[in-house]
Amino acid sequence: MQSSKFRRAILDKLTENSFNSETAELSTLVILLISYLIITIILFWISKKTILSVFKKLTTKTKSTFDDILLLHNIPKLLSYFPALFLLHKLIPELFENQDWIENIFEALTIVVALALIRSLLKSLRDYLKTLSSFKDKPIDSYIQVIMIFLWFVGGIIILSVLTGTEIGTFLTTLGALSAVLLFVFKDTILGFVASVQITINDTVRIGDWISMTNSNADGTVLKISLSTVQIQNFDNTITSIPTYKLISDSFINWRGMSESSGRRIKRSILIKVGSIRFLKENEIQPLKKIKLMNGVIQTKEDEIKSHNETSNVDKSLLINGRNITNIGLFRSYTEAFLKQHPMISKEMTLMCRQLAPTSQGIPIEVYAFSKDKDWVKYEGIVADIFDHLLASTEYFHLECFELSPIIPPINV
């Protein structure tokens, strides 16, 4: 009512100043539009300052970081849009008679701002949950994205319904007929959501886990699990993005178990040349007793073998008869003794040196143990030091490591 009186007053004033009726009507409309826009801008500025001031006072008085995150995601600014939108929604349609589409536009804008506000609130909630230790490794982004897709879907239907003046039920009926097309379009999104739920329930992958997926050339730390992709930072600092559903459909290695255990596994072999393996004679055994780690071991073996051979009345004129000490057997014993006294090898976990099945490259002597230090760089240094020593030790046991000799073609003279 006040708007109509104000409009009539301006129109009368312009008519008194020799404006014809059409020009006066148009000029009045322009003056009112500019006035309303200025008032709206002033109201928006006051609302923004007031709401921002309230939020800043709250952040200084509370210890929680949630209100700081709300400020970071522009929640006060989005809230300050509503008074301005409500004012425009009230004033602008009164300037145009029988123009319902203008009112529909403002209703649609209000819905858009409301959706943007909800989006910022969800982002704030996501960032806040990530600061909590119990949620740091959870795929929160996936669930936020699912909620936002649903909200934008519903919001889009409502906006179209408002703009076209059609009932929501009509749109839902149409979308029901297009459900097959929608399922095809959002196939990856649906698969990603299902995968995210399964990953969380089964605790398959967490943010911060080290995973290896050979098929996707991914080997590194999981940075982010979203609805559509999983981002992995490889050890060369490159980023690999793989579809989330691949964590369910494809095989991969998760090294979390190793990280959480008390040691990291060492499983590596030395290939011994078959031709160098033999029984040791007495004059070859005596020098090995000088090895600190072998003195007691050799003496125990000698006593055991001597007792067996005497009991069995073995003819030792041939070395092959009865039981004998072999160089590869002593090397295995030495390797185990060396690992047991190594300060960086876990004594609480499996520790052994075993002989594997012969291969065309020789006899594999495998070290199976666990390093106390799980850091990759330090781990590799520990393994290298152990095998440097073992490789250099083989000659003391009259053993040779396998090494493929290059094939030299014959020279035609």
Image: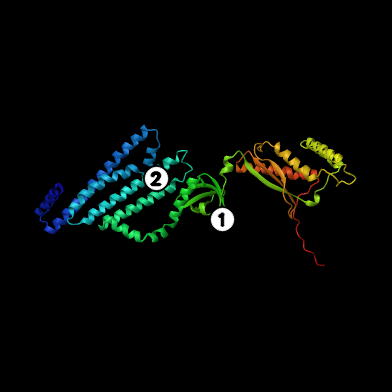
Distance of label 1 from label 2 (alpha carbons)? 33 Å
Work out whether residue 128 or residue 202 is closer to the camera in this orientation and state it.
Answer: 202
Residue 357 position (above or below residue 127): below
The residue pinned by badge 1 equals: 215
Residue 6, numbered label: none
* Residue located 57% across and 41% down the image: 259
Q: Amino acid at mark 1?
A: Asn
Relative image position of residue 127 (x, y in whole percent): 42, 42
Chain-order first, disc 1 or disc 2:
2
Relative image position of residue 217 (x, y in whole percent): 56, 54
- Give the quadrant of residue 190: bottom left
* Residue located 72% across and 45% down the image: 354
Q: Amino acid at mark 2?
A: Lys
Badge 1 marks a residue whose secondary structure is helix
The residue pinned by badge 2 equals: 123
Q: Nearer the viewer, mark 1 or mark 2?
A: 1
Residue 83 position (above or below residue 23): above
Judge left or right: residue 412 versus residue 56. Answer: right
Relative image position of residue 355 (x, y in whole percent): 73, 47
Q: Give the farthest residue toward the right.
A: 317
- Give the quadrant of residue 371: top right
Q: Crowding near pointer 2: few (<14 within 10 Å), some, many (20+)?
A: many
* Residue located 72% across and 40% down the image: 336
Badge 2 marks a residue whose secondary structure is helix
Judge left or right: residue 188 versus residue 17. Answer: right
Whether residue 289 can be seen here: no
Q: Give the farthest residue toward the left.
A: 16
Work out whether residue 220 or residue 237 is closer to the camera in this orientation and state it.
Answer: 220
Whether residue 314 can be seen here: yes
